[in-house]
Amino acid sequence: MNISPDNIILIQFGVVKISATLLFTWIVMVFLVTGSYLITRYLSSDVEIARGQNLLEILVSGLRSQIRDVSQQEADPFLPFIGTLFIFILTANLLSVIPGFQSPTASLSTTTALAICVFVAVPVFGVGDRGWLDYLKQYTKPTIFMLPFTVLGEFSRTLALAVRLYGNMMSGSVIAAILLGFTPLFFPVVMQLFGLLTGTIQAYIFSILAMVYIASATTAHQQVANKFSRSPNKGGN
Amino acid sequence: MTDSGLIAMVSIFTAGLTIAIGSIGPAFGEARAVAQALSSIAQQPDEAPTITRTLFVGLAMIESTAIYCFVVTMILIFANPFWDHAIQTVGK
């Protein structure tokens, strides 16, 4: 039994192996790009708008309000990165109900790649917002003795981000496969439905955690203290 | 008992033990977190979106310990490195 779609090698050119993970990642990418292209071709600001445009507007405005609530900052700089993460993971998770589709997020390689993107994005946003010195100084807060632990925390939370998404998505497919063995037909379908819920929540959690990490790097400590002493503003939706 | 038999026995036993013990702690933790969040929402329904979002993020954090145990269990059963080693040694 395979616990990772990495082991399914479809085509091999010398050292270059095209595994199921790669293939299905490309399928998700093509799906997203062509879908967005087809929908955004005929954008209108009319009273009557197309269903696809309505869907994308809900998605983008929901993302913006969530990012604004979590980071307590303007959503614009973070929307491309966080939105891409969310939409990619959500699509990859939800498409796993299609028979034969091996969700790319059920492979540790994909989730590690996504987590490394977050790992790189945190200092990029932090340095861009606060400058090198101010950003590096936050590692020595509250005291210089905490330096090893804050640096270790950076790595361990990246690992946790990757393993959390991988474990959740892999467990869904593995449990469905095990249940097929002794209670076929009905119960695996219920678990698949539950997998839809888990997939949505995990996509949400991954992007929100990425946003929390980036927000903690971009805001100065005093600003954070001020924001939290004030009563938090109402959530978007 | 042969080496491979011993490895299989210990691996399966440890896998069961790992997921059993590893799920108790997060289960208690998540139960406490959800109970607290529900009573907070009951007291302050206006803050429900903020509480819910914080609850989800916190649950994900708590749950990750259970997920680590699950991943270790899966590795022990389906991708055990010692098992592969023993099979290769027997094959020689």
Image (spheres, rainbow, N blue to C red):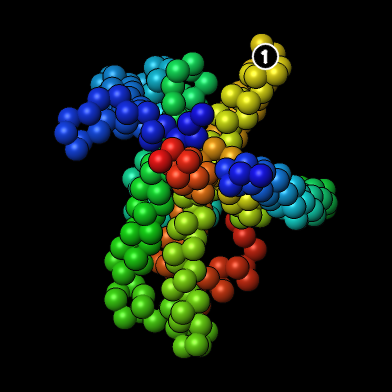
Residue type (three-letter) at the residue carrying disc 1: Pro
Residue A122 shows in the view: yes
Front residue (pair A78, A237): A78
Q: Quick one: SS at disc 1?
A: loop
Q: Position of residue A213 (x, y in %)?
A: 47, 61
Picture layout, residue A77 above or below residue A18: below
View extreme (bottom): residue: A144
The residue marked by circle 1 belongs to what chain? A
Picture layout, residue B82 above or below residue A158: above
View extreme (left): residue: A14
Picture layout, residue A19 above or below residue A136: above
Q: Residue at x 59, y 24 (%)?
A: A177
Q: Position of residue A43 (x, y in %)?
A: 30, 23
User: Mark 1 highlights which residue?
Assistant: A184
Q: Residue at x 39, y 17 (%)?
A: A50
Q: Residue at x 49, y 63 (%)?
A: A156
Residue B52 shows in the view: no
Front residue (pair A47, B22): B22
Q: Position of residue A72 (x, y in %)?
A: 50, 59
Q: Position of residue B2 (x, y in %)?
A: 61, 44
Quadrant in which residue B32 is drawn: bottom right
Crowd class of label 1 (few under 14; some 14 to 19; many from 20; radius 10 Å): few
Instruction: Identify the image quadrant of the C terminus of chain A.
Output: top right
Q: Residue at x 38, y 59 (%)?
A: A119
Front residue (pair A21, B11): B11
